[in-house]
Image (cartoon, grey):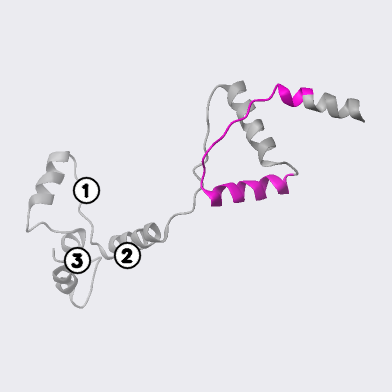
């Protein structure tokens, strides 16, 4: 038994210690995931470091959940698109800039009123300050 402990001690002598700072929520979640996989957080990080050394690149997943603010902004943009509160298509950047700088610029809903029929087409426009 003492020989076994001595062997483990020698194996650990070859290891390097890395101290990192991370958000406590990230650490907790990573520990939880590692545990579900039957690993320790140290096992998980060592595996990742070995993979980086092996393939000589770092890959991150972009599968984060959007914030509430982003979700609200996307919903608003979808609504504006559906209602025609979008610019017409432009062939050049110069045309787009002219449209943006024109106080009398017309939105798609103004250019295609047969598609965007509303009771008070101008009421929303004035409430938007445009």
Q: Nearer the viewer, residue 54 or 111?
A: 54
Identify the residue under disc 2.
79
Residue 39: % across, % down: 73, 41
In the image, residue 127 sits, relative to residue 42, either above or below, namely below
Q: CA distance from mark 3 to mark 2?
A: 17 Å
The C terminus sits in image quarter: bottom left
Residue 107: % across, % down: 17, 59
Q: CA distance from mark 2 to mark 1?
A: 18 Å
Q: Nearer the viewer, mark 3 or mark 1?
A: 1
Helix or strand or loop: what does disc 2 sit on? Answer: helix
Q: Nearer the viewer, residue 61 or 95?
A: 61
**Do the residues under discs 3 and 2 have CB atoms within 8 angstroms?**
no
Helix or strand or loop: what does disc 3 sit on? Answer: loop
Residue 78: % across, % down: 34, 60
Q: Which residues are magenta?
A: 10-37
Which numbered disc covers residue 89? 1
Identify the residue under disc 3.
113
Residue 36: % across, % down: 72, 49
Q: Nearer the viewer, mark 2 or mark 1?
A: 2
Q: Is residue 43 left or right of residue 122?
A: right
**Do the residues under discs 2 and 1 have CB atoms within 8 angstroms?**
no
Q: Nearer the viewer, residue 72 or 9?
A: 9
Image quadrant in which you'd find residue 49 = top right
Task: Kindly give the residue lying farthest to the right in the view shown.
Answer: 1
Q: Earlier in the sequence, mark 3 or mark 1?
A: 1
Q: CA distance from mark 3 to mark 1?
A: 16 Å
Q: Earlier in the sequence, mark 3 or mark 2?
A: 2
Local packing at callout 2 (Cα closer than 10 Å; few below 14, some 14-19, many 20+) is few
Q: Nearer the viewer, residue 24 or 9?
A: 9
Q: Main secondary structure of the magenta part?
A: helix
């Amino acid at each position: 038994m003492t020989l076994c402990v001595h062997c483990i001690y020698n194996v650990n002598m070859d290891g390097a210690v890395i101290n990192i700072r991370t958000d406590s929520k990230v650490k907790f979640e990573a520990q939880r995931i590692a545990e579900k996989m039957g690993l320790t957080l140290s096992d998980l990080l060592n595996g990742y470091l070995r993979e980086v050394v092996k393939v000589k690149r770092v890959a991150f997943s972009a599968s984060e959940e959007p914030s509430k603010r982003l979700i609200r902004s996307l919903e608003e943009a979808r609504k504006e698109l559906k209602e025609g509160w979008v610019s017409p298509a432009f062939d050049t950047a110069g045309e787009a800039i002219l449209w943006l700088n024109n106080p009398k610029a017309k939105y798609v809903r103004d250019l295609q009123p047969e598609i965007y029929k509303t009771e008070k087409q101008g009421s929303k426009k004035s409430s938007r300050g445009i």
